Image: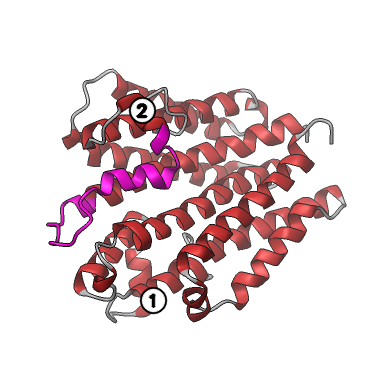
Amino acid sequence: MLSRTAENLYWTARYLERADSIVRLLEVAYRISLIPNTKEGYDNEWESILSTSGIKDNYLSIYKDIKKEKIELFLLFDDRNSSSVKSCINNARENIRMVRTAVTLEVWNAVNSFFYNFNDLTKKKYYSKDLPEIIDLVKRNVNLIKGTIVNTQLLNDGFDFLILGNYFERADFTARIIDVKYFILLPSTSLIGTQVDNFQWSLMLRSVSSYRAFKWAYGNSEIDYIKIIDFLILNSQCPRSLFFSVEKINHHLTRLKKIYGEKTASLTKINMLYKTLKSSTVTQILDEGLHDFLSKFIKDISSVYQSVEKKYFMTSQ
């Protein structure tokens, strides 16, 4: 496969997953904002999602002050934000348009329809009350596209690059959202393990579509942060966990090794990360410090991508 085609497929999937991730962050803020703040509480969940997305400085350079409605517009529709949902959808469509012959007609139609459906929203005046409906539209369309890819694409190297884009983005997002919940959204360290803390964790589970899966995994036992950290980082059956994403990346890089007949630096790195997560426990993670662990994970997964980029996407390679 041509390096340009591989890169376009990868970024199509990654931008779609990023759009989905942004609305999930908005959903976290929206749900938590419905909870009455405690006396010690952190009362600006909206600012926290800018920090999570790594775009706070960009936002402040444009809007100057932190306001809920402006943050919603910035994350959903602002062309000046390269990570806005609109920008992600536009970029996904442009990437896949350039390689239309590498995807099925069904996949192209699903992406194209999503593009036009979302752009219809940009023609209307935005009201905050519309946020839940927009979140649902994005999540529904992204899931439709992913299902279409799985059910219609030939399982060749193009399929591998599509799946890699999805799980590189998901791994990064899951790590960031756990970090924000534990490090920013928690009102006070004195509330760790309390009913307020557990309720916030349960809302986060719902926002990553993992609440019911968590209940299946742990029965009707009380929700607590240790179980949720185990579920979202180490659980091999949770499709939103860090381990699950790393396992998928490892699997598809291994497939590419077989297709192209050579081992790569990216496969060596992801193998090391896979083995580290597989042998880790929640106790070890908390002893190391959850923030430090997640920061290192984000750095490691970025390093794996850089190796993928160098090997498969740069035409000089």
Say which residue appears at 50% left-offset and 45% top-offset: 146
Q: How far apart are marks 1 and 2 (CA)?
A: 37 Å
Residues at badges 1 and 2 in contact (C-beta under 8 Å)?
A: no
Location of residue 247 with respect to 81 vertically, above or below: below
The residue labelled by disc 1 is: 227
Image coordinates for residue 32, horizontal then vertical, percent? 22, 54
Tell me, for residue 118, which label it has, or none. 2
User: Which of 101/253 is in front?
Assistant: 253
**Mark 1 burial class by Cα count in 10 Å: few <14, some 14-19, many 20+:** some
- The secondary structure type at the circle numbered 2 is helix
User: Which of 58/316 is in front?
Assistant: 58
Amino acid found under the numbered disc labelled 1:
Lys
User: Which of 233/99 is in front?
Assistant: 233
Numbered range of the magenta stretch: 31-57
**Mark 2 burial class by Cα count in 10 Å: few <14, some 14-19, many 20+:** some
Numbered disc in front, either 1 or 2: 1
Quadrant occupied by the C terminus: top right
Quadrant occupied by the N terminus: top right
Residue 37 painted magenta: yes
